[in-house]
Amino acid sequence: MAISNQTTEKVRERADIEEVVNDYVSLKRKGQNLWACCPFHQEKTPSFSVSPSKQIYKCFGCGKAGDTIQFIMDIEGVGFNEAIKHLAQKYGIEIEESNAPSTPEEIQQYNEKESLLIVLNYAKNHFAENLKSEEGRSIGLSYFKERGFDAEIIEKFELGYAQNSWDGLLTAGKKAGFETETLMKAGLILEKDGEKWYDRFRGRVIFPFHNLSGKAIAFGARILTNDKKQPKYINSPETEVYHKSDVLYGIYQAKQAIRQHDLCFLVEGYTDVISLHMAGIPNVVASSGTSLTENQIKLIKRFTDNVTVLYDGDPAGIKASLRGIDMLLEGGLFVKAVVFPEGEDPDSYSRKVGKERFASYLKEKSQDFIRFKIGLMWEESREDPIARADGIRQVIHSIGKVGDAMVRNLYVKDASRLLEIDENLIHAEINKHFLSQQRRKDWKEKHMDSPSPQEEFLPVEKPKTDYGNILMLQEKETIRILITYGWEKISEELHVCEYLMQETGELQFETPVYKRMFEYYKQALKKGILPGTDYFLQGNDNEIKQVVIDMVSHKYELSELWEKRFQIFTIKEADDLAKTVYSSVLRLKRRVVHKMLQETMEKMKSAEDADIQELQRVYMEVKSYQVTIDKQLGMVISN
């Protein structure tokens, strides 16, 4: 069944763009809008803008734009109905169903991904219920209690237990109506000999992985026996809804705390995350035993720019995982590190010393990545000058990963003092190994379709002016003025929309989307509706929505200080609306006329002699009209 229009409208009214986006990225106010690094593409300088007044978002880097519903569709990768359900749940709105038949698009939205999420969340509840069984209490629950996990933490992370049976989940799932194929696609069961199936997780405690909205997407499972033939941990395979390189364990439970503290602690395993929560430190996530990936770093950066990596007291393990620091630096994060005493990890040490001493230890032992790496280097190369030189290079190479030039320069000064090396030598090493490569990389990305440096000096044919594109831009500008100021008056008796309708009535918009918008506008006026930006944003035409957001979003804003403090006033288009509208109409007519002139000239090139004279007459008539428009336009501009 489809979701009713009433529910959709309630969601549109209640869902606040700032609140919704803030669940995924850390927004900072600048002027009238809120800004962040875009969650849809990698960037170091924020270009993702949220307008609370217009209830829209727009990325000036990748072009993603929309309202609250579109944001959830984009960020969660779900269809329209699922986005409505997500927001309805967030705002406590009861979902009403419509008797109208679902459209093909709505049916398609309820696809394999939705089916997998449903069965995975069924499995999560099944594993949680197993903790109440006799086997679950004696094995699974006993293990959690031994680790100090109380009922609150078990519920918070939705921990569970997979019974030690061949097909317990399979049998229960089929009884609940799930197909064997769906259970297998979700990674919950395995196939044997082409005709038999059995549970993937058996006799293990279960740690669910959640997506940002709190739905279970995968599971990690730990064995509780000393069976050397079995791996200690097994995880769900990759599926349509779970890609391990994109996921961090505990991100759902930690995201608000990470934003609140503006800091993320990064650990290795599930129990490390849970132990820190129990120690009163909820802003923690785990890479879950896998090497840190770019997408995991992007996920952290949605909520903070600051990361503290917690290392077990194992020198070999620390050395093996140092590459993660360089990746974090490349991802634009500020990195610190804490090393626990030898033989300890975050889980064991927090339980050993208690909450207060553990929190104090994190504060006292936290050090920036330079001091951390220098300390490791001195330990390993006390008596070996060659090894020491190699260690120094590694420290310098890490500094070279820092993208912000000012921050990088401060790190160079710090390293120069600590290593007793001239700053110029450090800069030279950085330039040699990193900056030159980075410049080439940046140049290639920026000039992907441009000629190489050598080709730039070759003579090129001057491109012909694309008058069709120029006309499209002017049509866009005319529509922008229409939907922005349509209800404003340019005289005592004349509205902007009335004037534009009169002056453009004989013109035909050539760009399809602007033609549709113009027609929708006229239809709305006939119904007694004055259609502004909200009218188009709440429609079903996604192309029009994108166009409207692009029209009303501005990358740069004039600071109020110009007027308030310095008494510097700028002329705005709304200050003289009559002139703005009149000028826009003249420019549109001029673009249309110019295009007509070009088309007439092209026809003359291939016309028969008998037709040349008529085409010349048409050309001169249109040219005369252009001269008249130019005079009028010149008068408007010079006033």
Image: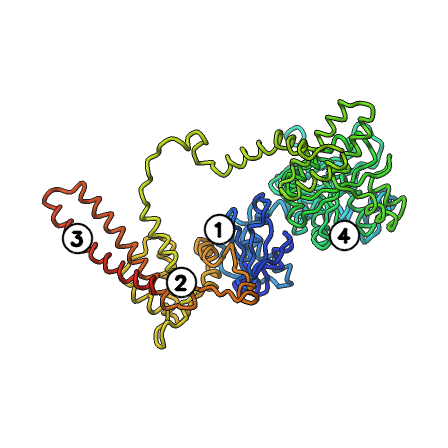
Q: Nearer the viewer, mark 1 or mark 2?
A: 2
| Residue furthest left in the image | 610
| Residue furthest bottom in the image | 492
Amino acid type indicated by mark 1: Glu
Amino acid type indicated by mark 3: Val
Looking at the rendering, which quadrant does residue 43 occupy? top right
- Per the image, the residue denoted by label 1 is 105
Q: CA distance from mark 4 to mark 1?
A: 36 Å
Q: Name the element at disc 1.
A: helix
Closer to the chain start, of discs 4 and 1, is 1
Q: Is 637 situated left or right of 609 in this image?
A: right
Crowding at dot 3, Cα within 10 Å, few <14 / some 14-19 / many 20+, comes out as: some
Closer to the chain start, of discs 3 and 1, is 1
Q: Nearer the viewer, mark 4 or mark 1?
A: 4
Q: Quadrant of the C terminus?
A: bottom left
Q: Is 80 situated left or right of 170 in this image?
A: left
Q: CA distance from mark 1 to mark 2?
A: 33 Å
Q: Name the element at disc 3.
A: helix
Residue 522 to residue 427: above or below = below
Q: Name the element at disc 2.
A: helix
Camera-side residue of 230 and 210: 210
Camera-side residue of 520 and 121: 520
- Per the image, the residue denoted by label 4 is 156
- Per the image, the residue denoted by label 2 is 481
- Per the image, the residue denoted by label 3 is 618
Q: CA distance from mark 3 to mark 1?
A: 49 Å
Camera-side residue of 406 and 166: 406
Q: CA distance from mark 3 to mark 4?
A: 78 Å
Q: CA distance from mark 2 to mark 4?
A: 51 Å
Residue 377 to residue 518: above or below = above
